[in-house]
Image (cartoon, grey):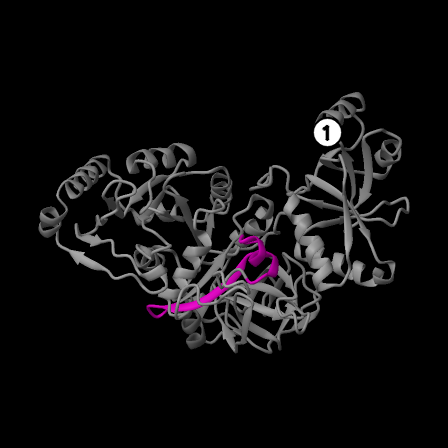
Amino acid sequence: MTEATETRPGLDRDASRSVLAEAARRRTFAIISHPDAGKTTLTEKFLLYGGAIAEAGAVKARDGRRRATSDWMALEQQRGISITSTVLQFTYRDHVVNLLDTPGHRDFSEDTYRVLTAVDAAVMVLDMAKGIEPQTLKLFEVCRAEHVPILTFVNKADRPGRDPLELLDDIEARIGVRPTPVTWPVGEPGALRGVLDRRDGTFVRFVRSVHGATEAAEEVVGPDQAAAEEGPAWREATEACALLDEVGADLDVKTFLAGESSPLFVGSALTNFGVRHLLDAVVDLAPPPAPRLDAAGRPRPLEAPFAGFVFKMQANMDPAHRDHVAFVRVCSGRFARGMVTTHGTTGKPFATKYAAALFGAERTTIDEAFPGDVVGLVNASELRIGDTLHAGDPVTFPPIVSFAPELFVTARNVDTSRAKQFRRGLEQLEREGVIQVLVDPRGDPTPLLGAVGPMQFDVAAHRLANEFGATVVLEPTALRDARLTDASTADVLVGEPGVRVVRRRDGALLALFESRFRRERLASEHPGWRLDPVVGDGGPGANLGS
């Protein structure tokens, strides 16, 4: 800490040291994967090993099937997939772990992208039989754009799968990052005997836990004993590791933090095997919070007065109260419940009386938080995704890019007596980024909804009916391509077949086309028309839903 930092107005030297010490204990990371790779299962097993839950799968769905703590939304439980990101905070080895579980399905990529702006590292989960899948590749590209270092977990190693060396080649070829195995499977795919820990040469024998409900037993065996007991399986594993040694595929923290390599671990989340290795790596290798760059590219010191940004909004997490929560990533300073901050967008004071720590849908009142933590501000209706809150020196963090919608449906309210609930529900869903609400500037009151993927419309309809009491009929349209336009271009586009002009909530005019080819033809015939890419086109992960 520099002398300038120690003497900055409004900061106490001991308080600054406390903030830095607390920040050093934080590990804030996301779990990303293609659907069905085992991401949500791994999330729950982290909670088990962190002592946050006593038994994996202990929380039951109504029909008796197991469900994860992170999948709290009713529609998630019905469909067995993650629809919305969740924050789960727990302690492990005297560190505060902020785990952000993300949706794996491509239709909810925008939610995942917003989460990745708020973390310091990510765990990429791969299915050993499938390796790099399309959604995994796209999410990795977002991590690269956000400079998020990645740990890799090869899951389902106890089932038949690909040759491990072939899998390494595929990872490096497709994502351009060098995998550096820390643990290596002993036994051919489908006949896992355990893993060889390349750091000390020991063998950790694979022992199944009963239904994966409790921590897996870990029998650590020396190399000589492993060679005697495991025979050919151990010999093949050591030969593979010798080859890795020769090509220099060794753990390198410097290149990992630079995003050039990815420490790789092997295991089975379902049986809990390898979970502790990975969780230890999150604590030992993942970086603690660092000074975050503001919109002008200047780093905000960790010990500066409190500042944070909103990366997610979520309504009705508590059905009994029908409230909504703003998820704020703390970037600097000490957050104290009740402190009065400044809302960067409006410049107005913003009180933080109702602040909570988040654990899925559960929340508990907190008194303080530090860089790396995620604070839930309850009933913060003035806030929007991307807004900054700060105390002391003003700061604005880079905006969170929104995606260009690719699908459009007409939303019709079935019960006109519920018009107020219908409008309020659409407003809330748009605030959360679930869908975009588009209206006809010429007066047609029927809204058009825009989204990246079709399941976003399913979520919108389900939540409108169950949370706001407004049943809707969603009618598909042939519109597929959106461009920003202006009033003069809009006037001439209105009469064009296969084109519709709509207005966003921020007042911007969008021209929607039935195909890209139709838009390109009109643009070539009328070069003076304004048909610009929608904000998000070409940005990090802008086409994740395609």
| Residue 304 coordinates in the image, percent (x, y) | 50, 67
| Residue 437 coordinates in the image, percent (x, y) | 76, 50
Q: Looking at this view, is 465 or 184 the one in front? A: 465
Residue shown at the point (30%, 54%) measured from the top left:
274
Asked if residue 1 shows in the view, the reply is: no
| Residue 241 coordinates in the image, percent (x, y) | 20, 40
| Residue designated by label 1 | 515
Residue at the limit of the structure toward the front, as seen here: 63
Residue 290, above or below 335: above
Residue 498, above or below 268: above
Residue 138, above or below 112: above
Q: Secondary structure at mark 1?
A: loop
Please name the amino acid that badge 1 sits on: Ser
**259 within the magenta span:** no
Q: Which residues are magenta?
A: 72-95
Asked if residue 450 shows in the view, the reply is: yes
Q: Is residue 409 left or right of residue 234?
A: right
Q: Is residue 74 left or right of residue 53?
A: right
Q: Quadrant of residue 468?
A: bottom right
Q: Looking at this view, is 79 or 351 the one in front? A: 79
Q: In what quadrant of the picture does the N terminus appear?
A: bottom left
Residue shown at the point (47%, 47%) measured from the top left:
36
Q: Quadrant of residue 423?
A: bottom right
Q: In what quadrant of the picture does the C terminus appear?
A: top right
